[in-house]
Every structure is written in C-alpha cells, then in structure tokens.
Image (cartoon, grey):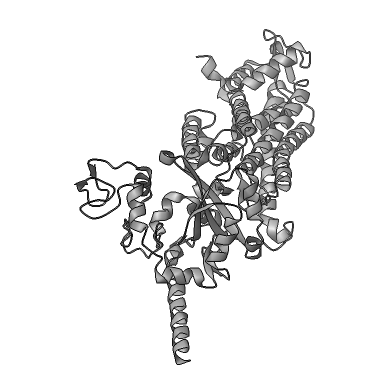
Amino acid sequence: MNEENKNSKKNEEQNVDIEKELKNNVETSKKDAGKSWDEVLFEMADLSKTTKVQTKCWNCNSNLKESDWCSVCRAPIKESIKQEVLNRHISAETIKCWRCRGTTSGNICGVCGSPLTAEGMESLTADIKHSAEMKLVEEQEFLFILSPKDRQLIKIALKFTDLESAIAKHFTIKHSTLTNYGPEMIVERPVESRFYDKFEHEKLLVENNLRVLFKGIRIPSNEADLIIIRFFYWKPLEEVNRFEFKNIRWKLLALALTITTIILAGWFYTREVFDLFSIERSMAIDITIFTCALLGISVMHELAHYIVQRVKKITLSLPYFLPIPPIPGFMSYFLLGAAGGFIRVVNPVHKRNDLFDLYFYGPLAGVVTSIALLLIGLSSPYIAEISELSQTSLDRIAEIQQFDPVMLIMMFFNWFGTVTNLAPIINPETQVSFIHPLTYAAIVGLILNGLNYLPGSILDGGFMFRSLFGERLARIFSYVTSLFLMFNFTTWGLGVLTMFVPRSLYQTPITNEALQPHWSRYILGGFAITIAVICFPLPSFLFTL
C-alpha cells in the first residue's frame, strides 16, 4: 500500500512538473499581450515559426536542449535542414554534414553521427522510444491548447490519445507531437474535401471548443502530399446586441462624419458649377442627390458583405464608414467625401473560397450601383453657351477639366450615352458642360469600388488575392500595388495607406489553408482586376502632353 502511495505521489509530482513545464512554454507569449487574436492565429499557422518556439522534438518527442538539433535522435530542428534531410534518399559519396560541416558519406555522418538522409533518420529512430515524460503527457487526462483570444494555453480535459483516435477516423496519421501551440498532427491529404468538414464537426472537438488549422506541405522527392493539423481553443462568443448604442456609438459618429464630408463635397462641387454657369436656383436638391447617391453606393457595398457573411456563416463587425474631408478650392478627385467602409472579421474564416466571396461581392455591388446611377445622371448634365461665360469662368473651367480623372469605363459610357441619345449632344465649339452631381457621385463610386479590387493590403482585393495565392504572394502583390498607386498623381494617398498601414489591421485568418480555392474564383479574380483597370483614374493632363 505504501508503495502504491509513493507511486501515486510520484505521478502527481510528475504531473505538476509537466504542467509547470507546459505553462512555462508560453511565458514568452506574455510579451505579445498587445497582439490581437488574428495576429496570434496567423503566427500559429505560419510553419516557419515552429522552430522558434518548439520545445519538443518533431521526430522523437523528447525535450529539446539545443535549438538546432535533438540530442536524443540527432534530428535537425530547423525546418529548412529538416526538409533537406527528409528529401534526400540516396546515399552520397561525399556530402557536407548539416551539423558539423564535416565531409562524409553514407546515411549517417561518420564524424558527429547525425542523419544525412531519410534512411539515416529511420535507422537512428528505430530503437528510440518516447521519453517517460512524453509518455506521461500522452497518458494524462488533460492537454494545453493555445487560445488566440487569450494569448495563452488553455487546460483542456482531453487525452492526447483520444485526440489521435478522433483524427484517425478521418485521416491517416503519419506523425504526431506536442508543440508550444499544443498538439500537432501530420496526416495524408484526404481524397475528398468533405473529410475536412466532417472532422471539424467531431463531437470531441465541438464539446471542447476546439477549432482546427489545416496547412498543406509537399515533399517532392517521394511525392508525399501531407497536411499539418493544429488546434486552437475558440469559445463561441456570447450573443450580444450589436445594435445597442454603447456598442455602436463610435460607428455612428464615423457615419455622421462621413455624411457631413459627403455633404461638403457635394456643396463644394455644386457651388463651383453654379457660380461658373451663373445658375440662380437652389443648390439644396443637387447636394441632397449627391449625398444620397454616394452614401447609397457605400451602403450597397457593405450590404453585399453582410449578405455573404450571413450565407457563409461568418461573423463580421458593423462597418466603420471612413470620411474624407474635401479640400476647398479643388475639384475632381479631391472631392470624394468618403472612402467607403471598414469591417473586421470577428471569427476565423473556414475556407479560402469563403474569404474570396466575402470580399469579392462588396465592390461588385458598389460598381453595379454606380453604373445604374451613372446611366441616370448622364441625361442631365449642366450645359452653358461659351458666349454667355466670362473669360475668367472659361479659364477656371479649363483649369478644372485639366485635373479631371480619365477612366476607360467613363470613356465607354460617354460614347454609349452619345450613340443611344441617353446623354444630350454637346457642341464643344459653342458649348461647355459639367456632369450632374448624380453622375459625379457615380464616378466617385466607380473609383472607390474599382480601386478596392486592386491587390493592396487593406483593400478587398488584398484579401481576395491572399485567398487565391497565399500570404507570401499576396504581400508581393500588395507592395507592387502600393508603389503603383503612390507614383500615380491621382491615387498617391491610397498608395501610402496600403504601404504603411500596419499588417495587423487587415488580417483575416483562414483555418483551412490546405483546401485550394475553386477554379471559378481565379476567373472571378481576373474579372475583378479588369474592373480595377477600367475604373482606374488617371489625370487628364497626362493625355495632353
């Protein structure tokens, strides 16, 4: 009996030690206290960061004493060296050892005994068993799993072996281990995509509030197509009334400021035209039309986001509308009045298709609405006879028109309005015209929504291209887009924003990176870029040089 008590006490002490060790694994995360949950989840999904926080060997699960190699099985820890060793299957006559840099041959280094090939790795690990500590972790009744929202590990009443059994129902497990993030499994890629969804709805995961990260890896030498599975703790948010005043007061303030700046933009434009053309009727109606039209385009954009998030079961925040104060004395693109809205994803997005759809249909709704308003506004421009205008007015008109943005889509609709008699025919020799405020609002809508399709970081197109091509290529697209916008006279401000706005403001994590987007999304992505090109504004003076 005394012996049993001793063993029980010893096991309890070992459990305490392991619990303390696992808690110590995330002590470094305290310095990340200011990070948002999506930043933490992004780092968790980044396989390149694994070796920086790993405390268990990926090969034998023993505790790591070195940062570059395992002292038990001599496995390389750095991801690049690890893949180099696993991808090499043929013993070389002479090769430099990755660890001691000695020149040797065969599957195992003759100098330091480190594995040089996949076969060498297998021979070294054939007789190595899990350490007693790892075995105890597998047998204990709890696991520590990362909670991105809390930025710490959460103790879950779940056995490691039970989690492995749940995975084995849907996937073929090739390797399993524990990391600072929690359990990690490497499995074969399933034949059908439905296995992902079936696994995510496993009772064991749902009951313990566990969500799954899928990341694909490929080993070319043996054509292995594998998936890395990681887990994170995500407790469903309590239902709150998002429309309570205390929850939306800042959004209401932003909306009020946006309406104000739109009214000012409409007033500056209408006042300038009325003064030039000596129009004496009230400006109130035209200003109201401009305000309602531009605000309506923004609302339709956000409404499309809302509809998609309901269909895809994605939780979004209510939009922050972004005001742009007009610059007195300037016309054209300086009188935007608004920059659309800004939303945040409250929960991680499951699939790359869902992320693409969420951000594709917002600008599309804005463009369609803008075109509808444009067709109405083309029929009612301001027209004046040149003979009735003073030379001062004519000089001012020439100055304003010099900075008018030129867009391919407007060139088309101007032609379309002429050939269909939708727009009145104007004799440029004897008449001068200005577009109606409704047309101006439509042009602003086309600019804002068209530019939103560019693959810049904070733009809808940035999210779309990340869903299609991944994080690394999306960053390259974003930098190129930012430079292009910065060197264009009409869009330099947006270029500065897309280049320097912090990355944490536009992250939207995808939990299943392993499942590729449907081919139709690539076609829609090309369609989006086409819209961005034909709606891109260039100053007209470039065409008169």
Foreground residue among 322 and 203: 203
Tell me what residue is drawn at x 74 percent, y 16 percent: 417
Q: Is residue 233 visible?
A: no
Which picture quadrant has residue 458?
top right
Q: Is residue 175 above or below residue 14?
A: above
| Percent x, y of residue 490 | 54, 29
Tell me what residue is drawn at x 46 percent, y 39 percent: 223
Count of number-bearing discs: 0
Tell me what residue is drawn at x 34 percent, y 54 percent: 123
Q: Is residue 452 above or below residue 163?
A: above
Which picture quadrant has residue 365?
top right
Q: Is residue 191 visible?
A: yes
In-image side of 60 versus 456 (left or right)? left
| Percent x, y of residue 230 | 52, 56
Q: Is residue 477 above or below residue 56?
A: above
In-image side of 507 versus 237 (left or right)? left
| Percent x, y of residue 32 | 46, 60
Which picture quadrant has residue 355?
top right
Identity of the residue furthest to the top in this view: 429
| Percent x, y of residue 72 | 32, 62
Foreground residue among 95 and 485: 95
Tell me what residue is drawn at x 69 percent, y 31 percent: 367
Foreground residue among 373 and 92: 92
In-image side of 259 versus 421 (left or right)? left
Foreground residue among 129 and 181: 129
Identity of the residue furthest to the bottom in this view: 2
In-image side of 195 versus 292 (left or right)? left
